[in-house]
Amino acid sequence: MTSADAVAVHGVSGRAFEDLSSRMGSEPWPPTPLERARIRMDHLLATDPGGCWVAEDAGEVVGCSMGLVREGMWGLSLLVVDPGAQSAGIGRELLTLAHEHGRNAGWRVILSSEDPRAMRAYARLGLALEPAVEAAGLSGLPVSADVRPAVATDRELMDAVDREVRGAARGSDIGAMRAGGAALFVVDGEGYAVALEGHVWTVAARQEAAARELLVAALSTAPDGGRAMVHFLTARQRWAIDTCLDAGLELRSGGSAVFIDGAPGPYTPYVPSGMYL
């Protein structure tokens, strides 16, 4: 993949997820604006060029995979195939190439949609499947005074907490999320959260009490009258499920899952990032 493929990949991704929602009878995922999607793609092309691949048919991009490696952790950031090119082995080959990028990684994680073909492929990699739910609704909880906006000097805390909780720091991924317009919050000495317009991108903290405060702050970024959303909540994240229920959100089983193996951290209290794991 190169930066010149970004527009085509964005189009394939939009069509693939729209088709998936139609096939599964589920609510469509909100489309990501091209400008924001480009930030993610250009960032991963810079940090993990060996993990980013496209498939072409007659010179047209019909699929893409993006894998990343962070301090011994491999993750799948994106795997999409145009609906008209699916079931022909393209997705399997793209996944193989992205996965090979992490051949020396100590542990692996994939956040999966409800697509049964994708889940089959991820399970075949030998990762353990953890069913996940999502939460959505209007948050009614006040933000704690212990939460403040993050500043540049908080990167050391963020990296330290990520290493303790998930086993690997995100490093420059934090800057990419900020460049995408997200709000970042911190509880001093405890952890951080990232959210955009009520969509919780990630939460990581040392203690559940701080994680709850950070999650509430992330939910509060929803526009007035707008819904907040949290994805990929597994049984490990009971603290987050309880917080969402206390805030007035509803739980939904969208059929998504977390595939994981070998994680050196407890992976809790944590809400994973769909883009950066």
Image (cartoon, grey):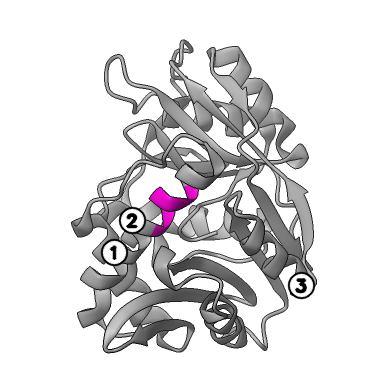
Give the labeled residue for mark 1: 10
Q: Nearer the viewer, residue 246 or 85?
A: 85
As helix, strand or loop, the secondary structure at mark 1 comes to: helix
As helix, strand or loop, the secondary structure at mark 3 comes to: helix
Q: Which mark is residue 259?
A: none
Decide: few, some or many residues near mark 3? Use Cα within 10 Å; few <14, some 14-19, many ≥20.
Answer: few
Let me know if residue 80 appears in the view: yes
Do the residues under discs 1 and 2 have CB atoms within 8 angstroms?
A: yes
Identify the mark nearer the N-term, 3 or 1.
1
* In-image side of 22 versus 181 (left or right): right
The vertical placement of 243 against 266, above or below, is: above
Amino acid type at circle 3 is Arg
* In-image side of 239 versus 13 (left or right): right
- Residue 132 covered by magenta stretch: no
The residues tagged by marks 1 and 2 sit, at their Cα atoms, a distance apart of 6 Å
Let me know if residue 264 appears in the view: no
As helix, strand or loop, the secondary structure at mark 2 comes to: helix
The residues tagged by marks 3 and 1 sit, at their Cα atoms, a distance apart of 27 Å
Q: Nearer the viewer, residue 55 or 99?
A: 55
Amino acid type at circle 1 is His
Give the labeled residue for mark 3: 124
Give the labeled residue for mark 2: 14
The vertical placement of 122 against 268, above or below, is: below
Q: Which residues are magenta?
A: 16-20
Residue occupying image coordinates x 28% and y 60%? 37
Residue occupying image coordinates x 66% and y 88%? 103
* In-image side of 123 versus 149 (left or right): right
| Quarter of image, res 35 | bottom left
The residues tagged by marks 2 and 3 sit, at their Cα atoms, a distance apart of 26 Å
Identify the mark nearer the N-term, 2 or 3.
2
Residue occupying image coordinates x 54% and y 75%? 91
Q: Nearer the viewer, residue 27 or 87?
A: 87
